[in-house]
Amino acid sequence: NYRCRSAFKLLEIDETHNILRPGISVIDCGAAPGAWSQVAVGRVNATGYDLDAPVGFVLGVDLLHIPPLDGAVFLPHSDLQELAVQARIQESLPAGEAQVILSDVAPNASGIRELDQQRLAELCFCVFELARRVLSPGGTLLCKFWDGTNSRLLHSRLTQLFREVKTLKPAASRKESSEVYYLAKYYRKS
Ligand code: SAM
């Protein structure tokens, strides 16, 4: 039972691209109400349910309250745009590192398309900064974006930071939405 339909987008992406595996540490940016974290907890074996597999770690961050979830650590009421929050995230991670960062972050829609895109682009850049701070070499970033004017800028920044960048449009996304996900693999830590 997932808390939100968005779980199916992550399941679909992970099915094809194998980004989550037992034992790794994952950050879920914009985690509320917690459906992606539910998927991540299962895939990384964060509860230790599979006794034969290594135990992973899931850290969810959101502006909003996130109902507790077995196997996940949550930082609610936390704005990813604040440096203090980024520092809290780093302190909360085992060894201060994550192998995967997931971002389904989205601003409250104002209805003005350009403005919403601009705000989401700013949030994406904050997630990239977080990656530079805590992502381990070779790590993966999955990041939601609304396709539009800033797409090329975000994409080119990602290609500087990662060896491989793909643009994904999950079937589970509503067809009419301009939502896409960037899947960036093999982080080049400098
Ligand atoms: N992936 C989630 C799930 O499956 O349950 C759904 C995420 S929802 C589409 C986007 C979330 O981004 C919202 O809960 C919102 O509060 C959060 N968000 C927006 N701006 C944020 C910010 N600056 N810092 C942290 N979270 C933010």
Image: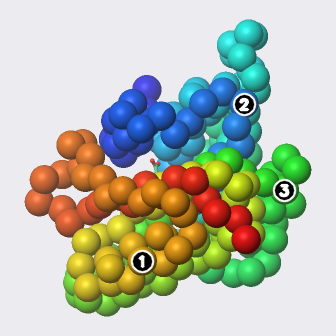
Tag 1–tag 3 contact (CB < 8 Å)? no
Residue type, mark 1 in image:
Ser
- At 71% from the left and 43% from the top, the residue drawn is 25
Residue 168's place in the image compared with 146, above or below, is above
Disc 1 from disc 3: Cα separation = 27 Å
Residue type, mark 2 in image:
Gly
Percent x, y of residue 65: 61, 58
Percent x, y of residue 175: 13, 53
Depth check, mark 1 against mark 3: the one in front is 1
Residue 81's place in the image compared with 47, above or below, is below
> Residue at label 3?
96
Q: Quadrant of the C terminus?
A: bottom right
Q: Residues within 10 Å of mark 2 (few under 14, many from 20)?
A: some
> Residue at label 2?
23
Percent x, y of residue 30: 53, 61
Residue 162's place in the image compared with 68, above or below, is below
Residue type, mark 3 in image:
Gly
Along the polypeptide, which appears first: circle 1 or circle 3?
3
- At 88% from the left and 50% from the top, the residue drawn is 95
Q: Nearer the viewer, residue 154 or 156?
A: 156
